[in-house]
Image: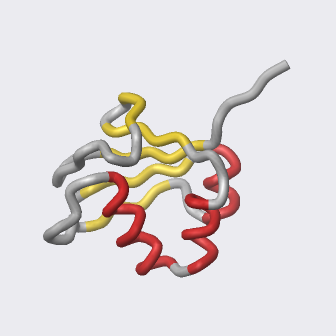
Amino acid sequence: MLKIVYFASLKDRIGRSEESIDLPEGISSVDSLIDHLSTMHGEEWSSTINGSTVLVAVNHEMSDRSAPIKEGDEVAFFPPVTGG
């Protein structure tokens, strides 16, 4: 299983804080996972993740979308943090 976690405003827009999926064959990077989840969840999910600056962490480490993933990993998506 691959655990996918959504934080802050992404959680609100997507409507869930996390989900777990069996990692399909051929999905080996965050980019390919995003493509797969876009197909699974549709246009609203895709526009939420792709339409803004979304940060990614794999196993609690900041990553980019080309980062490799494997079964058992945790992939987290979250908006950039701003403060004042």
Residue located 22% across and 67% down the image: 22
Can you give x and y, in whole percent of width and height, for residue 49 in the image?
57, 59
Residue located 20% across and 71% down the image: 24
Outermost residue, top side: 84
Position of the C terminus by quadrant: top right
Vertical position of residue 81 compared to residue 47: above or below: above
Q: Is residue 52 left or right of residue 2?
A: right
Vertical position of residue 73 compared to residue 16: above or below: above
**Front one among 61 and 50:** 50
Q: Is residue 47 left or right of residue 35?
A: right
| Rendered image coloring scheme | secondary structure
Can you give x and y, in whole percent of width and height, for residue 43 in the image?
59, 79
Can you give x and y, in whole percent of width and height, for residue 10 in the image?
63, 53
Residue located 50% across and 47% down the image: 77
Task: Specify the quadrant of the image occupied by residue 79.
Answer: top right
Outermost residue, front side: 66
Residue located 20% across and 56% down the image: 28
Q: Is residue 27 left or right of residue 36?
A: left
Task: Specify the quadrant of the image occupied by residue 44.
Answer: bottom right
Outermost residue, right side: 84
Can you give x and y, in whole percent of width and height, for residue 47 in the image?
62, 68
**Front one among 73 and 28:** 28
Position of the N terminus by quadrant: bottom left
Q: Is residue 14 left or right of residue 63?
A: right
Vertical position of residue 69 compared to residue 57: above or below: below
Say how many tags the image has.
0
